[in-house]
Structures are given as structure tokens and as C-alpha cells.
């Protein structure tokens, strides 16, 4: 039961983190494809949900990484137009990367937490972009009207990659500064395991 | 890996439905996004208010536009032959038929429609009736296993076509053929080229744009000119060629004959380098994929036919089934998306693709509906495609121009909507002819954009905004027989338009913006003003309802 509450807390933190990102993005002007700067400016909003996941993976046992990824995905899937399976797969990739980096040393180290947050945010953003692009191509092949997203050159792939890079840097910087806040989120303590 | 693979599969599958169900508990977290609603409201650039007066004015205008759409089915230049009975129909969502060469149409009077009758839209021939659903055999009773799986909602419930639905086989179909005649250009006629017969049908493989195939031409001398239906008079013929009722379509336009240079392909699609074939193709004046709206089915009156249904006024889209929805906040964290989250979801009957409106203005379409709400892609969401019609701002009752599929490029600095319009040369010629018919000769035409038929869960007549359509601006590189004798312009010149008289809405509520013409590309970027705002009370379209559905 204790662990169930812990995972529920992770899902709520994931959702709140996503909300915070949306809130920041909403402060920026709308996207104009002719001005890639508008996309890059919106990308300045850090990917807080990835930070929640990376920090949780860094703090908790390695065998919990998979569960953490799925519960963070559960939280953030409520606030995205991306397919739920895509969000879950992206969160798993982030967890695997963070866990892989953790194999070298504890993620508390500044360089590693910077790398883990940056790589996680960039990979998640690129993955969602890729999912959108593939789905758009499939829809286009059968003549279905596309409902936003990458495709038809509406948003250039290089711009999307640039946006992923910007989000990665801002996420990493926030991770560097506020790591203790994310690693100490209430509820994570319920998921800690005894070392012996 | 498996998750990643499944995420790339087309949406709406069984796995996705299971995932949606599994995510249901997380939907309870939706209210956590409420703070973003404040931001979204602040972003909304609505200075028009959302009072009842504006809504009433917009609804009245939308009804006039709808009435104009219905007119677009009737021919303007071609005269219907004596004895022809025209049945009005409206193109339903293309999703009804998976085949691109087949389109589903809902007709006003299905009792009069028979397989093999010709289908036209305006002066253009489209195809023939391939299936009349209410006459088709009912589907077989499903097996017990299928019924059990449907009861468990593992398999979707069967969707039977409505009784007024017919399937129309477009002339683009590989096996479709129609007799035709080429009308030579005046200068060719002076050189002795005479009208000659040929058969048209299917598409030319390898052509850069859709061109209809030509077969067994009577003469090789006719290389260009208008191609019109001319079915041979074969007594007793019942097939596609020479069918009696198809001859009612004689004189309707199929397209423009053109020579196409197509790289020859060898066996198994290998390139035979450098070998270019000159092939005759017919450039159709309509976009068969997304430019079809109102149609007429032409047949002869028969003794057993039911009494004719009087042409009633269409039930306006505003009278359909709508569900009000509140904005919960921003819908997606992707920096290149422009989305909204609304409170009405699948439990309220909201489905993917449904139109979301502010008053009578289209705000966007639902991209995902779940139990707790829906995500809406706004029209300014880059990559969003929409099928639109244009109506002269000063003459909303005139027959509109079908612009076809436009792609959103985002929002401009002033909050205006940026739409990319990529007409083919033939479509551009049609736009010019339409502008000329309205007595307009300038480079730009002040138009109002609105929705037509053929988009799933989007009613016709919804306003999108106003723009200046660059109908008479030609690229210097523009080629083709239609370009001769017309001035070539590099950049848009100032529009010479009189201030349009607004029927009900003041100019401030619908600012008209210019279009960018990009030299070197057959793409025109339309800057659309007076678009919907997320600040007002939003509504989601659930469907036409029984009353409207019966009225097609």
C-alpha cells in the first residue's frame, strides 16, 4: 500500500511538472512557422516531467526505474496530444538513459545530472516528434487530413531538432540548480527500499 | 521496443483504445492544468466580445454561406438536357470509403438514384454512381464470437451507412472510363485541328499532379484544349461506356488536355535513364481528394420512381447537435504545437475530428477525445489541414470558390492565421474565372473563408476568417497554355478593391489581411484575420442530428 501511494505521488508530480511546462509555454507567443524563433522561444520552457523522472531514477533503486517511467508517463499523458503509447515509450527511454548514466556514478554529481537531464529531455522531445512525423506520413498516405504536427514541411525537422536542443539545455540547467528539490519531492520516500 | 513500435502505428487501433482505457485514472489529474487556462485566456486576442448579437450576426451569415454552397452543385455554363432529373447530394466524409477513387455522397432523394448514373458538380463531370446503399443487400449476421467481442467493446460496433448514402466511383478510378471530345483551342482550330473523340479515365502514372488518363484518341493532332463528356450513342448499351443515363452528362467538363513529359519506367519500376515519354493527360479542374462538396446525380425519370422530394432549405449546421465545452488549458507541451484542452470528452459524445467553434467560427478540430476531455488542434496548429471555400466578402450569396486543402503554418505576429494554399494551374485558372464572373479584375480578391462538405464531423458554413486571395498574381515561372497573354508579376501589387459592404458584421470584427505570394513556388500564404478566439464559450459539434441528417 505504501508503495502504491508512492507511485501515485510520482504520477501526480509528473502531471504537475507537465502543467508547469505548459504554463510557461503559454506565456510565449504562438508559433509562426515562417519564424523558427517562435518555436525555439517556446522550447525554452524546461521539461520538468523528465526532471521528475530522472531525479526519481537517481534516488531510488534501479529495479524501480521501469515503474517510475510508466507512472510519470501516466501523469504527463493527460496533458499531451501525443499518443499515450508514444509517451510511455519516451518515458522508458529517458529512464533507461538515466539508469545507464547511473551505472558510472551516482546522479547526484553535477556533470551526470546535467547530462541525464539534457539527454532525457532531448530524447523525449525528438521521440515525440518522430512519432508525430511517422503518423503524419501514414495519415497522408491514406488521404486523411492531418491534425497538426510535423509534416508537409509545416515545421522543419531541423527546427524541431533545434527546439529539442533548447529544451534539453534549459532542462539541464534547471536540473543542475534545483536537483535537490526534484530528488526530494514528497512521496518518493515511500518508494525507498532498505539496503539490507 | 514493442511500445515504441506500437506508438508508431496509425491511431485508433485496438492497442491504443486499451492504452486510453488504462490511462483513465490519470485523467482525474486533468484539473491540475487549470492554471494554464488563465494563460490561454490572456493569449486570446479577442476584442470582438462574445455577445449574443455577434453570435446572431455570424449565424445569419453562416446560413447565407451555406445556401451559397448548395448552389455550387448546379451547372452555370452547361444546360441540363431535357428529361434529366437532378438529385442534389453532398459529399460525406471521405473516411466512409477507404478507396481514394470512391467518395460517399448523401443525396436528398435516394429513391431516384440508380447505379450507373452520372455525377457532376457545377460544370464538371466527376464520375458515376457505383452503389446505392439502401438498395444493397443487408450485411450478413455476425458470428457469435464477433458479437461477444463487440459486447466487450474489443471490436468496434458496425457503422452502417445511412439510407441516403451512395458511393460514387470517381473518374480517377483505374477501371473507370467515359467517352469524351476534345475542343481544340481557337488558334489550333485555325490550323485545321478539328474536335476529336477519345476515352478518358484513370490517372496517368508518374505525373507530378493528378492527370486523368487518355485512351484510344481518334486523332493525334489534338494536343490541347477543353475535354468534355461525349458518350457515344450505342442503342441498348448498359455498361459504363454508352450507358443511356451517362449521356445526360454530355457537355460537362472533364478537364484540360495537356502534354506531359514523364520519365519512362522500365520493368519493376526501374528507371530507364534519360528516356522521357510524351503522354497526353487531362488536368481536372477540381481536386478530387478534397475539393468536392455539393454534387448532382443526373438520371431520367422512370415510371416507378417515388414522387419528387421538393428542394427544401437546408437545415443549417447551427441546428445540429452541439455540446458546450470549457477550456481547461494548453493541450500539448510540444513547442511547435498550438493546442487546447477542453472539458467535454468522449463521454459527452465528442469524437476525433469534431469541429470546435466559437460562435459560428471554427476554432479547431479535436485530435484526441478521452473520458475526461479532449485535445483540440487549433487552426493555427502548424501542419493542420483543412478544406475551405472562399466567398466574395461583398457577395456572400454568390456561388463560392472551392479552395481545397489548405495547410496551417502557424500564427503571424499580429495573431492572424497563416494558411498555405497550393493551387494547381488549373485550379488557379478556375479561381480566375470565378473572380471574373464576380466582375472582379484586380490582383487580389477580398474573400471570406469558410468550411464546406467532406470533412468528418465538421459542418459546412463555419466561418474561418477573411483574407485577400491572390487570384490574378502569376509567377514569372508559371507555365502552361493558360498563362499566355496574361501579365506576369513578381510581387503582389496593391489590391484595388472597393471597401466591401458588410452584411452584418463590422469591419473591426473581421480584419482583412494580405497574402504573401512566394515567387518560385506554387504556394500562396494567406494571412487570415477575424479568426475564432478561445476566450468565448466554445461548442463541439457532435453530429447533424436526425433532422439535419435527413436533410443532407
Image: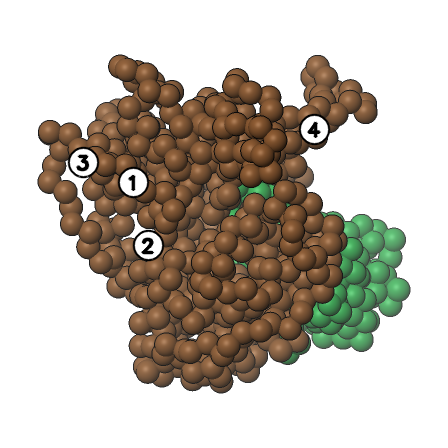
Q: Residues within 10 Å of mark 1 (few under 14, many from 20)?
A: some
| N-term-proximal mark, 2 vs 1 | 2
Q: Residue at x 51, y 69 (%)?
A: B446
Q: Residue at x 62, y 67 (%)?
A: B515
| N-term-proximal mark, 3 vs 1 | 1
* Residue B109 figure quarter: top left
Labels 4 and 3 in the same subunit: yes
- The picture places residue B320, in percent across and down from the top left corner, at 28, 60
Of the pair A162 and B272, the residue shown nearer to us: B272
SS at mark 2 in the image? helix
* Residue A43 figure quarter: bottom right
- Tell me, yes or no, whether the two marked residues, 1 and 4, touch with CB atoms within 8 Å: no
Mark 2 or 1, which is nearer the eye? 1
Q: Spatial distance from mark 2 to mark 4, Cα to Cα?
A: 38 Å
Would you name the residue on which mark 3 appears?
A: B111
Mark 2 or 3, which is nearer the eye? 2
Amino acid at each position: 500500500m505504501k508503495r502504491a501511494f508512492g507511485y501515485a505521488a510520482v504520477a501526480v508530480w509528473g502531471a504537475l511538472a507537465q502543467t508547469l511546462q505548459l504554463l510557461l509555454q503559454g506565456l510565449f507567443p504562438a508559433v509562426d512557422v515562417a519564424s523558427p524563433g517562435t518555436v525555439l522561444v517556446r522550447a525554452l520552457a524546461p521539461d520538468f516531467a523528465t526532471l521528475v523522472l530522472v531525479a526519481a531514477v537517481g534516488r531510488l533503486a534501479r529495479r524501480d526505474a521501469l515503474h517510475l517511467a510508466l507512472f510519470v508517463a501516466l501523469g504527463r499523458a493527460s496533458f499531451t496530444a501525443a499518443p499515450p503509447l508514444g509517451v510511455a515509450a519516451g518515458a522508458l527511454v529517458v529512464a533507461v538513459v538515466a539508469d545507464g548514466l547511473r551505472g558510472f556514478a551516482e546522479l547526484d554529481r553535477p556533470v551526470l545530472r546535467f547530462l541525464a537531464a539534457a539527454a532525457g529531455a532531448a530524447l523525449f522531445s525528438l521521440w515525440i516528434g518522430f512519432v508525430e512525423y511517422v503518423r503524419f506520413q501514414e495519415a497522408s498516405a491514406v488521404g486523411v487530413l492531418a491534425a497538426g504536427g510535423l509534416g508537409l514541411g509545416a515545421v522543419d525537422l531541423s527546427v524541431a531538432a533545434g527546439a529539442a536542443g533548447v529544451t534539453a539545455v534549459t532542462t539541464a540547467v534547471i536540473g543542475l540548480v534545483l536537483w535537490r528539490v526534484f530528488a526530494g519531492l514528497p512521496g518518493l520516500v515511500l518508494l525507498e527500499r532498505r539496503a539490507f | 521496443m514493442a511500445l515504441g513500435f506500437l506508438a508508431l502505428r496509425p491511431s485508433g487501433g485496438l492497442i491504443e483504445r486499451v492504452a486510453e482505457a488504462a490511462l483513465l485514472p490519470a485523467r482525474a489529474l486533468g484539473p491540475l492544468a487549470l492554471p494554464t487556462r488563465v494563460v490561454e485566456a490572456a493569449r486570446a486576442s479577442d476584442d470582438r466580445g462574445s455577445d449574443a448579437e455577434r453570435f446572431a450576426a455570424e449565424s445569419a451569415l453562416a446560413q447565407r454561406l451555406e445556401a451559397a454552397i448548395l448552389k455550387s452543385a448546379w451547372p452555370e455554363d452547361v444546360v441540363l438536357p431535357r428529361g434529366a432529373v437532378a438529385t442534389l447530394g453532398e459529399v460525406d466524409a471521405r473516411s466512409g470509403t477507404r478507396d481514394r477513387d470512391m467518395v460517399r455522397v448523401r443525396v436528398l432523394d435516394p429513391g431516384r438514384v440508380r447505379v450507373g448514373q452520372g455525377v457532376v458538380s457545377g460544370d464538371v463531370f466527376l464520375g458515376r454512381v457505383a452503389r446505392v446503399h439502401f438498395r444493397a443487400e443487408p450485411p450478413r449476421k455476425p458470428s457469435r464470437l464477433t458479437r461477444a467481442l463487440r459486447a466487450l467493446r474489443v471490436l468496434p460496433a458496425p457503422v452502417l451507412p445511412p439510407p441516403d448514402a451512395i458511393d460514387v466511383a470517381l473518374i480517377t478510378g483505374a477501371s473507370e472510363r467515359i467517352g469524351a471530345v476534345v475542343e481544340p483551342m481557337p488558334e489550333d482550330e485555325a490550323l485545321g485541328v478539328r474536335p476529336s473523340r477519345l476515352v478518358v479515365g484513370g490517372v496517368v502514372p508518374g505525373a507530378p499532379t493528378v492527370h486523368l488518363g487518355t485512351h484510344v484518341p481518334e486523332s493525334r493532332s489534338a494536343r490541347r484544349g477543353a475535354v468534355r463528356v461525349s458518350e457515344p450513342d450505342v442503342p441498348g448499351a448498359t455498361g459504363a461506356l454508352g450507358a443511356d443515363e451517362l449521356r445526360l452528362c454530355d457537355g460537362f467538363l472533364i478537364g484540360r488536355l495537356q502534354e506531359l513529359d514523364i520519365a519512362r519506367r522500365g520493368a519493376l519500376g526501374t528507371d530507364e535513364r534519360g528516356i522521357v515519354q510524351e503522354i497526353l493527360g487531362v488536368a481536372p479542374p477540381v481536386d478530387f481528394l478534397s475539393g468536392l462538396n455539393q454534387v448532382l446525380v443526373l438520371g431520367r425519370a422512370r415510371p416507378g420512381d417515388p414522387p419528387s422530394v421538393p428542394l427544401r432549405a437546408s437545415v443549417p449546421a447551427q441546428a445540429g447537435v452541439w455540446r458546450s465545452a470549457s477550456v481547461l488549458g494548453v493541450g500539448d507541451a510540444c513547442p511547435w504545437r498550438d493546442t487546447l484542452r477542453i472539458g467535454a470528452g468522449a463521454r459527452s459524445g465528442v469524437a476525433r475530428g469534431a469541429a470546435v467553434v466559437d460562435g459560428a467560427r471554427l476554432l479547431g478540430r479535436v485530435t484526441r477525445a478521452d473520458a475526461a476531455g479532449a485535445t483540440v488542434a487549433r487552426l493555427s496548429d502548424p501542419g493542420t489541414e483543412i478544406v475551405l471555400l472562399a466567398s466574395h466578402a461583398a457577395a456572400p450569396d454568390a456561388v463560392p470558390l472551392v479552395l481545397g486543402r489548405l495547410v496551417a503554418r502557424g500564427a503571424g505576429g499580429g495573431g492572424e492565421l497563416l494558411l498555405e494554399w497550393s493551387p494547381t494551374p488549373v485550379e488557379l485558372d478556375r479561381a480566375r474565372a470565378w473572380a471574373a464572373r464576380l466582375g472582379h479584375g484586380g490582383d487580389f480578391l477580398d474573400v471570406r473563408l469558410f468550411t464546406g462538405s467532406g470533412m468528418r464531423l465538421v459542418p459546412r458554413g463555419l466561418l474561418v476568417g477573411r483574407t485577400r486571395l491572390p487570384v490574378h498574381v502569376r509567377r514569372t515561372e508559371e507555365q502552361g497554355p493558360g498563362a499566355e497573354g496574361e501579365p506576369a508579376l513578381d510581387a503582389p501589387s496593391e489590391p484595388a478593391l472597393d471597401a466591401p459592404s458588410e452584411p452584418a458584421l463590422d469591419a473591426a470584427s473581421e480584419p482583412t489581411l494580405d497574402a504573401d505570394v512566394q515567387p518560385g513556388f506554387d504556394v500562396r500564404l494567406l494571412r487570415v484575420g477575424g479568426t475564432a478566439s478561445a476566450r468565448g464559450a466554445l461548442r463541439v459539434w457532435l453530429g447533424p442530428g436526425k433532422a439535419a441528417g435527413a436533410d443532407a
